[in-house]
Image: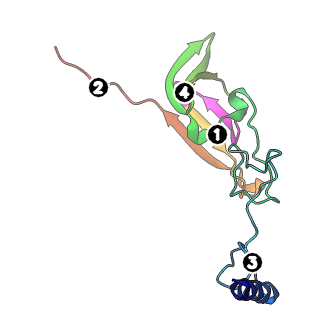
Amino acid sequence: MRRATTRVLSLAAALAMRPGPAVGQSTAPGGNAIPPPDVRAADSEGRRDPFVNPLRSPGAPPETVRPRGLAGIAVDELSLRGLVRIAGAHVAVLESGNGRSHLLRGGERLLDGSVRAVTAEGVTIVRHDAGDPPATGGRTVRLTLRAAPVQER
């Protein structure tokens, strides 16, 4: 029994002296050590918080919180549901990705664009992509209503 214990301890010492990643640490194909997941949010017993993303790297910026209302809605999330004329001006009724309805007038700002005009034909929005230079002015997006099919009696 003593001889087996001595062999196990000598094997463990030899593995500990060997250069390379620590026990339980992974390596990438190039031989570089892969950092452990972000476990900063843990309780006193060392358990990981289930609501913290373990794949996010520690140096990554936190996820941004969108502003409320139209300023927090992206152009791609909108669909035109109707057009209304109020006091000589047109107002668009839009539905966002979460199913909420919004009233939109010309000149209003969105998360990644601004409304150029609301007319009887539809809505014209200028989308400002992050990679576009300011001189280009952005990409024009046009939202229109489809004509309802005519039903015969």
Snapshot quadrant of residue 87: top right
Disc 1 and disc 2: Cα gap in Å? 30 Å
Answer with left or right where residue 89 lies relative to residue 52: left
Which comes before the other along the chain, label 3 or label 1?
A: 3
The local crowd at label 3, few if under 14, some if 14 to 19, many if 20 or more residues have their Cα within 10 Å, is some
The local crowd at label 4, few if under 14, some if 14 to 19, many if 20 or more residues have their Cα within 10 Å, is some
Asked whether disc 1 touches disc 2, contact meaning CB atoms under 8 Å apart, the reply is no
Q: Nearer the viewer, residue 98 or 63?
A: 63
The local crowd at label 1, few if under 14, some if 14 to 19, many if 20 or more residues have their Cα within 10 Å, is some
- Of badges 4 and 3, the one in the foreground is 3
Does residue 59 sit above or below 28 in this rendering?
A: above
- The x, y position of residue 116, in whole percent, is 66, 35
Answer with left or right where residue 72 lies relative to residue 123: right
Given the image, on which type of amino acid does mark 3 rest? Answer: Ala
Disc 2 and disc 4: Cα gap in Å? 21 Å
Q: Nearer the viewer, residue 142 or 29?
A: 29
> What mark, if any, has residue 33 been given in the picture?
3
Q: Nearer the viewer, residue 6 or 96?
A: 6
